[in-house]
Image (cartoon, grey):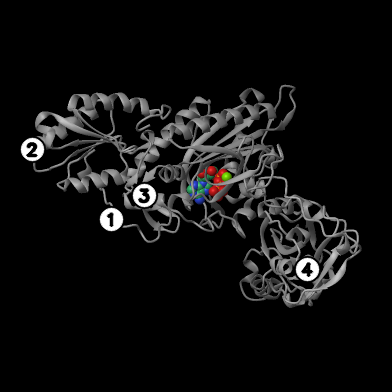
Amino acid sequence: MRVSRLLLVTLRDDPADAEIPSHKLLLRAGYIRRLGPGIYAYLPLLWRVLQKISAIVRQEMDSTGALETLLPQLQPAELWQRSGRWAGYTAGEGIMFHLEDRQGRELGLGPTHEEVITALAADLLRSYRQLPVNLYQIQTKFRDEIRPRFGLMRGREFIMKDAYSFHADEGSLRQTYAAMDNAYRRIFRRCGLKAVAVEADSGAIGGSASQEFMVTADAGEDLILSSADGCYAANQERAVSLPPAPVELPAGLRAGGAGELLATPGQTTIEQLVIAHGLEASQLVKVLLLLARFEDGQHQPLLISLRGDQQLNEVKLANAVSAKLAGEHGALLAIDPLSGELVAELNRSEGLTIDLAALPLGYLGPDLKDEMLSAACPSQLVDLRESRAGSAGAAALPQPPRPHLSTSFLRLTDPTAADLPAFVCGANQVDQHRLGASWAGLGLRPEVVDLRAAQPGDRCLHDPSQTLAAARGIEVGHIFQLGRKYSDAMEARFTNEKGVEESLWMGCYGIGVSRLAQAAVEQNHDANGIRWPLAIAPFEVIVVSASAQDPRQVSLAEAIYERLCNAGVDALLDDRDERAGVKFKDADLIGIPWRVVVGRGAAEGQVELVCRDDGQRRDLPVEAALEALLEVIPAARSGLVSGMGA
Ligand code: ATP
Ligand code: MG
């Protein structure tokens, strides 16, 4: 390819809307252009990178025996209603783009394909003899992300490789999961990425075991906690650890019972209480008031107790609340702090009359009475939709679920708080706390659930002499053992060896192909531009003649370019009539692993060979330079050998 034909448009300055190095570089070097929030055009250079990554992914998937397929992106709502995920994915914080067709039927744009593939499995798979089977595709996914950002890292339209396996039993699922784990490690290594595997939360996908692959980088959105002995690594969303031991309240302050009242005027935060009364944060129980919203309109107030020095892990909380109530109320749509704004919005949109001022916020104790809810919500719930029903045309609209506010709290307590024999907590009156309270003294038997966020510095469960260290990570892949969640819901069954029908076992496996391309840049760049790992570079060599005016240089550069192309090398010839400095800068910026410079030495048949990765330069006779390239490039292409350009 000739640079003059490449539509190469590079930018001298960093684009204003790009925050992290890889995003800036992909824009500046002419790899991508933004069309809207989270929507990018993949320009020809990036498309070559994506094709190379896809080829590696294909090879590794094929070698596990997986079959490539291509599934519809337009997905009937009915499939998602059967799995129970339609509301969760389309209402509240749901990320599925959805639409109505001309017949008024609802459709979603595929954010993921569990439903589609399980419906197919129900249709195609009948007998254990067809199992196991693993299908994969490489395709554009759509997600209406709440915060699209960082270019291809969190797009609203992006390329994913997703695979789904079906099995007769759990053992077979585990085998394929292990094979995919292995294939993923090879894929990331071949793409030149340093990725680590960490335990992960299974999120809205569901299922049991799951593991994420993280590219460590400061710009990563995820926090990884790991032990130095290499035995434990987890996404903070999922991580567990031993909490630091609390500082016990001095015996004299343990009043017993419900504790003594402590005047705490204006002291609504842990920090204020600690300073004003010489307390330790671990001597306090803090109480968070949140509101969970469900698919059927249920609004469930939550009263969450944590030790004062601990932080809430919102993912663990959502999992616990979902596990308790989703069976009765459908998908959990959102959990939000009960703030003034939320209350105003609820009052407005759902016809409620909650008065937040009735609640002693900042002074809440775990024994806050359920009656407080009625006090906060003095009148009966008004169903706006009923009062609207009389107006013309309204009856034809599908009715959203009727909002309903539960009149009792769901109270959950983290073990760190539940284990305190005596503590300080809010007294449920403004400007008052309780000193030396106990659970029994407050008349409570806490429901204990792990809700705390593990922190860097915490001791590890597997070996308390190890502590957790934090690193930031970009999630490039995620593999799940789904079990029978989808096959049960969508009746995807097979006949086993004994002739008995049972649900299929299922796994699913994703790689963010477009995110991976950008993660590679995040891990491989310098002040001058991108340093692509050779296996995924858009071109392997760029041939540059220092002077476009010198016919000898130009013809030697052409000859070298041709030799490389004929030898099967992905070569680029910078044939532009530009100054040498401009061409070198662009070559560094777009990050081609090898550069052959045809300069003044052309008359003697000498060229300069430059390695983008380590900056090494060598003056060599043309033949020696070609020989060196033809040796190092094919070896580095597999991505499995280390060394220059690999
Ligand atoms: P995240 O936690 O980053 O939102 P996820 O857990 O929702 O990702 P999965 O459903 O596991 O993602 O999707 C599989 C892979 O697709 C992810 O590992 C990631 O590499 C990629 N991916 C997910 N969302 C996006 C996105 N918005 N833009 C680009 N790639 C994405
Ligand atoms: Mg994930």
Left or right of 421: which side holds 547?
left
Name the residue carrying label 1: 12
Badge 2: residue crowd in 10 Å (few <14, some 14–19, many ≥20) = few
Foreground: 88 or 266?
266
4 vs 3, front mark: 4
Task: Describe the element under mark 4 as helix, strand or loop.
Answer: loop
C-alpha gap between disc 2 and disc 1: 29 Å
Q: Count up the numbered dots.
A: 4
* Disc 3 + disc 2, Cβ < 8 Å: no
Category of crowding for the residue at label 1, using alpha-carbon neighbours closer than 10 angstroms: few (below 14), some (14–19), many (at least 20): few
Q: Earlier in the sequence, mark 4 or mark 2?
A: 4
Position of 189 relative to 527 (above/below): above
| x then y, percent, for residue 23 | 40, 52
Residue 594 can be seen, yes or no: yes
Residue 56: x percent and y percent?
43, 32
Could you tell which of marks 4 and 1 lies nearer the N-terminus?
1
Residue where numbered disc 4 is placed: 364
Q: CA distance from mark 4 to mark 2?
A: 83 Å
Q: Which residue is mark 3?
A: 26
Q: Amino acid at mark 3?
A: Leu
Is the Cβ of the residue at disc 4 closer than 8 Å to that at disc 2? no
Q: Residue at x 36, y 49 (%)?
A: 26
